[in-house]
Amino acid sequence: MSAPEVNPLEKSRSPRIKLFIALAVVALAVGYLIVSSVRETSAYYMTINELQAAGPAVQNKKLRVAGTLVENSAQWNPQKLMLNFTLTDKGNQQLPVSYKGARPDMFKDGTEVIVEGTYTNGDFQASNLLLKCPSKYQDATTSQAQK
Amino acid sequence: MAQIGYAALLLTLIAGVYSAVIVVWGRQRRSAEMIESGKRGMVAAAVLCSISVLSLLYLVLTNDFRYQYVYETTSTFQPLAYHISALWQGQSGSILFWLWTLSLLSLFFILLKRNAIQPEFPYEIAILAALEAFFALLLLAAANPFAPAVEAYTEGFGGNPLLENPGMIYHPPTVLIGYAATAIPFAAIMGRLLAGMTADAAWLRNLRPWVLLSWLLLGVGILLGAQWAYVELGWGGYWAWDPVENASLIPWLINTAFLHALIMQERRGMFKLWNAILASATFLLCIFATWVTRGGAVRSVHAFGASSVGDFFLGGLIVLTIFSVWVIVTHRKQLKSDFEIQALGSREAAFLYTTLLFVAAAGLVLLGTVFPALSEAITGQQIAWGAESFDQITRILTPFLLVLLGVCPILGWRRTEGSKLLQSLLIPIAVALIAAAGVILLSGGPTYAALAFGLVSFVAVTILAEFYEGWRLRLRKGEGPLRALLHLITYSHRRYGGYLVHLGVLLMVIGITGQSLYQTSQQVALNRGESVTVGSYKLQYVDSGTEDSAAKRRFHASLQVYRNGQPQFSLEPERNYHYNVEQWVTEIALRSNLAEDLYVMLLGLEDNGLATFEILINPLISWLWLGGVVVLLGTVLAVLPLGRRSASPAV
Amino acid sequence: MSVLAILLIAALAGVYVSYPLWSRGNVKGQPTSRAMAAARPEPAAGASDVEELEIDEQAGRVEAEDYSPLAQSYTGGTAVSAAAEPDDEIERQVRALRQKRSTQQPGQASSTGRQVQRRPTQKK
């Protein structure tokens, strides 16, 4: 089959422009929705040092902090379902964390933990815990404790 | 035995390089003998790779701890099934598995072309052979499965207990085969361009099953992974938007866009440039996904550990990207469209919207995944999208997807008459509104639920209308009602297989929406004998116990579940401590039915018998898995060589 | 022992792979260079499902001018763009073959006796 007959209609710019405008409008509208919801739900990464330095400035922000679990610092209160523990940075700063929820599986001393939540008065209230599998042989798995 | 395996792998590398070189050379010299030799090289590569895989399998099955890989992935007390799955459980084994699958699929692809001599054949062989050589080189240089053990081990490490469940047997290989299969359309389209040709309808028609294969396997693999996470990892959900999960989702989304754009290329000669890009992107993103999983590129809770394997994948990714861009740019004349979209409301335009939607979705998932690194590079402050961010985006995009699913079949080629469109939309919209109202009335639920379920009903009606339309045609041709229905599905099986897939997608949307919008959860600490009421269930904590074994310390609690005052069934969640990895592992207790899942986790068991539970009710989640099965069936229907053979040869 | 096995495997592979290069005459059923000159384009696998188009037509979604070209895409007709620039003899012959066949196309799309095209077709 040879190329389609050249037809003034087919070569018309009008559908193309209409199409482009329509898509642009939709893209902008959707983009706006997406940007505003991401803004609300994203978290700032901070190290323990940065966090403690910033102090009250980051009071109501949603934050993520990474650290390693300090030996023997994990306390689990089954009645209140509260987990308290301390994280430490390479810089030897310590961060007390409280988490209301399920005690995660791979929670042991030396585990690398990322906590997500808010920071008030020197204490971190975590709403989410993300843990890393400590062993290097392990295959890809996800472990996430959620409220 | 390991020496044979290693040598076979080396020979596979040589065969791959040889094939790639000889076919291109043979193409230059118009020598069919050289091309035939290159084809044979692919046969040899597949056989040699199989020998290598069988050697590794032998080592793993015989617990030969003289080799590091065997030590890391097996133990003498591991059940047989997990011995076999050890083949793909470790880093190097999984890459070898990928190579092996690629070699077999490539061979199958090449042999199917036996009776056709086409100009792109040498290039297709060359690309696939080069890819096989790349993987073989990677294995030999950075991830040797036959490497000797670091110490003299007497017992294996045995793999992570989290991985000792059926999910680990079927999820990784499915994903890996899906990854491997994306190389075929890539090689075919690049090969066709290199040969100076453009793709005709017949050629595209033959390509479609390969695209469907990779699409299906990757999609099912991802879904199996989600189901595994739900049942095994025990946090109540099935998808955490973790970078590694996202990495496999991105190519699947692009593959979906590709699949649909390919249909338009077959029908109208449109989307040629799109398809060249999408075919390459699908394949390249699988390599990218592997790099993310293994190279430690993105901060993630997954730990394969950074290694030179990651560098290899990155290097390969860069080279292949440059190659694809070069091929497409230098052959762009062959990618000119035969048809321009005429109207915003035409079927051609709808396919464009679909393609854009899936590409946008893939782009957003990718953006969110690399956002921490990106934001740090740009602003110095690392910002991370949470799971909630991705969930919100999914909620924003889903209505668009559903509208397209419902409207596209109604649209006309080239343009749609307004009155006709309205006429076809009346009943579906009416049903949708009724459904939406029903949702609000019955559940008082969030508006979004009404929107989602309303749209789902809308699509369901339009799909059923399509079945009716086709059935009506067959009746007009004089067939009896039952025969008409059967023939409808078999003669137009590609389209109706597709509609069946869309119905499966609807079921999945129902499951996802139900679980995400209507989940209820409760955490409670109980003493023996106490009970708690969640939803329509009353759960009474009856007893608990602890047992010791060689592998683990088992803590379990039993619950008796009542409904309407009647005892229904009992559940026994566990929380076990595994000695070899020094980790706790939760074994959930789950009771599923079509309406909802009752999901119980044992969070802790104290010496005095105080037990902490987390109890979840996940409504409609079974529909997600059910939908997956329907998608599988629909795809199989679309791919099968059914239908009435036309007596005249196609061309 | 393993060394012997390895050498054997390598030798077998080598012989098998290189066979077309040093064997005289036709390798069992495979084309010779001369035969390649008469390259055949790949036939579409599977049956035609042009019924899909008939359903669309019944529902009033296809315009007259589109029916024939769409039908050809179902029956494996070629939609080779004229922009293709094949660079050698083989492609030229393939295209010539296709041209020849497509000029025979009208009315031949379905030889089972059913009328696929019910509208006047446009001759190229």
Image (cartoon, rainbow, N blue to C red):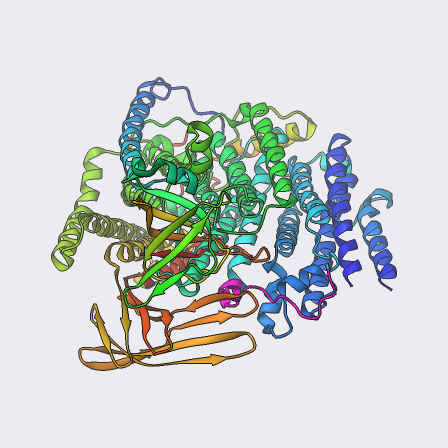
Asked whether C91 or B580 is in front, the reply is B580
Q: Is residue B466 left or right of residue B326?
A: left
Q: What residue is at 39 percent from the left and 26 percent from the top?
A: B340
Q: In which quarter of the image is the C terminus of chain A?
A: bottom left
Depicted C104 relative to depicted A146: above or below: above
> Residue B459: percent from the left, percent from the top?
27, 49
Q: Give the range drawn in magenta.
A: B151-168
Question: Toward the viewer: A47 or B413?
Answer: A47
Q: Is residue C12 above or below residue A34?
A: below
Q: Position of residue C105 (x, y in %)?
A: 50, 35
Q: Does the magenta stretch include residue B159?
A: yes
Which x, y percent locates residue B32? 76, 39
Q: Residue at x 73, y 34 (%)?
A: B24
* B58 lies left or right of A90: right
In the rendered view, tell whether residue C54 sits above or below residue B530. above
Q: Is residue B597 visible?
A: yes
**Residue B643 visible within the image:** no
Locate residue A83, reporting x and y percent: 35, 60
Left or right of B411: which side holds B634? right
